Amino acid sequence: MGFTRGSVWKNVDWWTIALYLVLVICGWFSVCGASYDYGEPNFFDITTRAGKQLMWIGCSLGLGFVILMLEDRIYDTYAYLIYGVLLLLLFGTIFNPHEIKGSRSWIVLGPVSLQPAEFAKFATALALGKYMNEYTFQMQRTRNLIAVLGIILLPMILIILQKETGSALVYLSFFLMLYREGMTGAVLFSGICAVIFFIVGLRFGAEIMPDDMTSWGEFSVLTLIILLSAFLVGRFCRQVPQLPIYIFGIGGGGTLLGTLFSNYVIPFNVCHLQLIICGAIVIALLYFYLKEQIREYLYIILFVIGSGIFFFSTDYVFNHVLEPHQKIRIEVLLGMKDDPAGAGYNVNQSKIAIGSGGLFGKGFLNGTQTKLKYVPEQDTDFIFCTIGEEQGFVGSAVVISLFMALILRLIVLSERQETRFGRVYGYCVLGIFFFHLFINVGMVLGLTPVIGIPLPFFSYGGSSLWGFTILLFVFLRIDAAREK
């Protein structure tokens, strides 16, 4: 297998290529605006950031052409090999002596620096497509689900060991594909609950109720666990119609009475009572599971116990696992601390730059906040603030609309695949682009934590641009051969 003999140009999706070219061109102009200093612009000089980005764009176009000309069977046949090679690169990078901004995720080869984590995304997507395309694969089988989770989590762990948490979190986007392929919604529900428990418990953990004994954070989370367990029993375990009513009445009513007693009679930690109630719920559900032999009871038991363990472990993770800069960013985001000159500086300056752009912006190369370098990382992670300042709300809306058009087009391409391999890979690509767009724009606007991930095709850097190009064009090559 090598270069294709037939032409793929009549089958390739030109709409997606057109969107790619428009985004890349807009991204280059954004890099020009973000890296421009007052004076004579020389955007084609390869010693400048704009010149280097233009060179990487040219390499990306050549890379896309080569990918389209290769046989489509290569990506299926060598999926595991590609995945294995990238895992070895990720592992080797952990011991890399070159540390850039506190991260060991880069391989330095003379004047060239490459980040294997950017290329591991497409390798992981290929491995997932290869494994899930097997004839015997079923998402409902525990063995298959564990293998899929292993394929996703292994590169995540290696990237975390490189101290590159932001890039590792991108791999959570693969769960969108798993949900499309039949993964139970319970996993998505559990993930949403985990986020809520973490935010509520952390944000209100230090605030005390009027009894001076009970934490608002712990009280709120345990109340949610009790009420959600009643809802889940009513939704999935209808063999005993009265059971959810009992759980809601005893759990909710007991919590209310305990709160009133603690506030007006004898103060005590109401959370202790709530833990007793949760224990009683677990015992009751275990009894009905042993009696009825219905797995849903067991799943709800695992939800209650797992929720409690997760919640009470978040404090340890937050204080002993996260790096200091990660902790302060989360605290600033949740409003627990105000640090405009420290952890909140990037976001505050980014908001000022975007707000100063108004409706139509200040014009290309006319931004003041970005030209005076008030915004750190303004041509990489925070490049969207350059778009907001120079092109205003209208320009920002156009850029987001282009990305949404690309994402919608990827949905269409994924759904028309004839094989699960193509569909799985397509939804992996879709998930990665959506995650990067949502987190990066939210990060710049102060809506999501600052985790340092690039905006596709816009952020300065060769590894990022090449990684996204490979990710997209491999899918276009698979799609072009779908009728075979």
Image: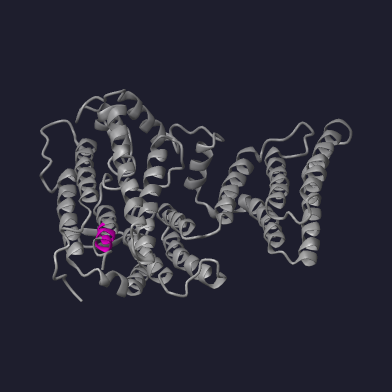
Q: Residue furthest front?
A: 483
For residue 445, side relative to residue 179 (left or right): left
Q: Is residue 264 magenta?
A: no
Quarter occupied by residue 187? bottom right
Foreground residue, 305 or 1? 1
Q: Is residue 474 magenta?
A: yes
For residue 151, side relative to residue 382 (left or right): right
Foreground residue, 446 or 329? 446
Magenta residues span 473-479
- Quarter of the figure with the N terminus: bottom left
- Residue beneath the point at 17% across and 43% down: 50
Q: Position of residue 481 (x, y in %)?
A: 24, 65
Colour theme = one colour
Q: Position of residue 56 (x, y in %)?
A: 18, 53
For residue 420, side relative to residue 247 (left or right): left
Q: Residue furthest right?
A: 265
In the displayed structure, 121 sits above or below 365; it is below
Q: Position of residue 448 (x, y in %)?
A: 46, 40
For residue 114, side relative to residue 159 (left or right): left
